[in-house]
Image (cartoon, rainbow, N blue to C red):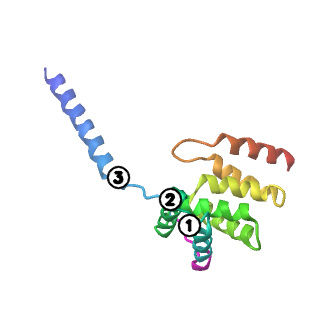
Amino acid sequence: MIGVVIALWFYIGFVFGRLSFAAGQPKTVPNSPIIEPELFAKAVDHAKTMAVTTDPQYKQHQKEHQQLLEELRNGSVEALYSVAQSLNNRNEGDDRITSVQLWHALADGADHVASAVALGFSYAEVDKELALQYFVQASNGNDEGPQQASLYNAGGLFLEL
């Protein structure tokens, strides 16, 4: 009988110890990218010109545009990535350089997987070692697990080196 009481006592202590340990752990805050003010100003300027229309038939586009601007001003990583993608697709003047700088800020500062993949593809022909580094970073993944396409691209680049 005493053995059962002692075992029960240890079991309860173990359960409460685990619960208090889990509750006492600090919550992880996702990394936020540090972006230079000039670069952020370029991103906001480009976001203001993205798909702007005054046609009342396209009110949904206007709402989405306003939402993108609001998210960008609030520091949304996904909004910055969308702007960088749009800059890269536009390809006028320094747009490609600005998009790569934004992707660097997101991939290096916030461990943003999609930005790391974009950098991997951007550097694939110019600097294979740096492209490999970004594909490996993206393949480490996030909460959803590794990104398989990045593993594939990293393997291909590794064979080319």
Residue 161 vs 6, above or below: the answer is: below
Looking at this rendering, what residue extends furthest in the front direction? 56
Q: Nearer the viewer, residue 120 or 1?
A: 120
Q: Amino acid at mark 3?
A: Gln
The residue identified by callout 2 is 59
In the rendered structure, which segment of residues is drawn in magenta? Answer: 33-39
Q: Amino acid at mark 2?
A: Lys
Question: Residue drawn at (61%, 52%), measured in percent from left and top?
Answer: 113
The residue identified by callout 3 is 25
Residue 78 vs 49, above or below: the answer is: above
Q: Secondary structure at mark 3?
A: loop
Q: Secondary structure at mark 2?
A: helix
Question: Residue drawn at (63%, 53%), measured in percent from left and top?
Answer: 114
Sooner in the amino-acid sequence: mark 3 or mark 1 = 3
State how many labels appear. 3
Q: Position of residue 155 (x, y in %)?
A: 77, 43
Q: Nearer the viewer, residue 78 or 65?
A: 65
**Callout in the foreground (3, 2):** 2
Q: Amino acid at mark 1?
A: Thr
Give how far apart the Cα atoms at labels 3 and 2 are: 46 Å
Q: Position of residue 74 (x, y in %)?
A: 46, 67
Check residue 9 for magenta coloring: no
Q: Position of residue 46 (x, y in %)?
A: 62, 71
Residue 133 vs 20, above or below: the answer is: below
